Image: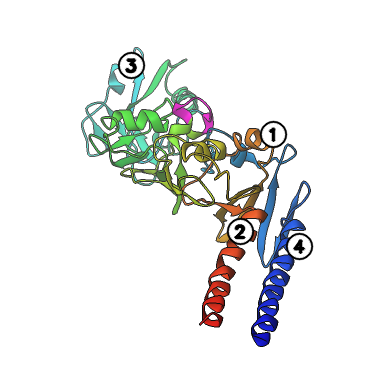
Amino acid sequence: MERKLIFMPRVFSSLFFALALSACGDAAMNFPVTKAGQAQLDGVTIIRLDQTYSGGADTLHSGHAVTNLPAVRRSEYRIGAGDVISIFVFDQPELAVPTSAETVTTGYLVRSDGNLTFPFIGTVEARGRAVEDLRLELVRRLSEFFPEPQVDVRVAEFASQKVVVGGEVAAPNTQFVQTSSLTLLEAINAAGGLKKDADTKAISIRRGGQNYRVDLEGFLSGSVAQNNPVLAGGDVVSVPRKTIREAYLLGEISKPSTVDLTETPLSLTQALSRQGGLDDLRADARGVFVFREIDGKTTVFQLDTSNPEGYLIGTRFALRPMDVIYVTRAPIQRWNDAISRFLPSVNATRAVRNL
């Protein structure tokens, strides 16, 4: 019996010593970033979300990223090889369009070398020139043969600058850039419009050997004007099929699950609310973390929701597909979990000693 009495205090002493250490550690627990700003921990960037944080698109409720496709200026059309140019000289019937290998019924063909041939003056460089520039050149050179020639120049057929539109559109086709600039939305409409399963948030434009992502939905929603870019000759537009985009909510949340970001962007606060919010008994409201991969590296956003201001900040933080939201356990819950792990051992020891 004496041996039993000595043994049991040692067990309880060890138990409460471990629990005391756990409680002290939890009570003094510091999160990676305790003030405004960011820090590095084991190669991971940790950013605290508060009123001073400004993270560009990450804080926009719309969640629409601005495309990095280089802008094309809305400028005059430049003639290119394959275009057919209509040239009419008033009161000069002998300059009517002849029929030859270098002409078609509607005008003069710009050859592969960028030139066209016109009666009396011969070869004229056309490629890369604006229509008005070419007209002035013809007037100057025809003035050597006719007094004050009146010349009208137009592009009769556009064939030098092509844009290909494919993917989830009703009628994939090839379009030609004309005198008026061709925007992405106009090109898609000219291809019969979008199919039901088209993903307007991830349209790809290939230009100069490089692919650029364009979130057209950002333009359609009225928030990002740059996401309806002017297309350039040679662009290839591909509209992908819509796939499910999700973010993941884990840890001490009432209903850990996924949230669908396919159709509608969600803020961090919205996502937490849809899953019932934080677990009142287990969650540490100070420890809401969003894990996100940026340029191949992990970035963690840290939010304190222990007061209403935290949830307000969360309404301005837009989630992205593949984000992982994790809510840590509260210190008191860690205490309870520790007790629940030790008690079976204590009870088992009691049962053995009572035999």
Do we see residue 241 in this rendering?
Answer: yes
Sequence-earlier tag: 3 or 1? 3
Sequence-earlier tag: 3 or 4? 4
Q: Which image quarter holds the N terminus? A: bottom right
80 versus 136 height, above or below: below
Q: Disc 2 designates what residue?
A: 336
Nearer to me, 4 or 240: 4
Q: Disc 3 designates what residue?
A: 92
Residue 337 painted magenta: no
**Secondary structure beneath label 1:** helix
Disc 3 to disc 4, C-alpha distance:
101 Å
Nearer to me, 111 or 92: 111
Residue type, mark 1 in image: Glu
Residue sitting at x 53%, y 27% = 223
Q: Confirm or deny contact between disc 3 and disc 4 (CB under 8 A).
A: no
Sequence-earlier tag: 4 or 2? 4
**Secondary structure beneath label 2:** helix
**Secondary structure beneath label 4:** helix
Disc 3 to disc 2, C-alpha distance:
101 Å
Q: Disc 1 designates what residue?
A: 309
Q: Disc 4 designates what residue?
A: 24
Residue at the bottom extreme of this rendering: 3
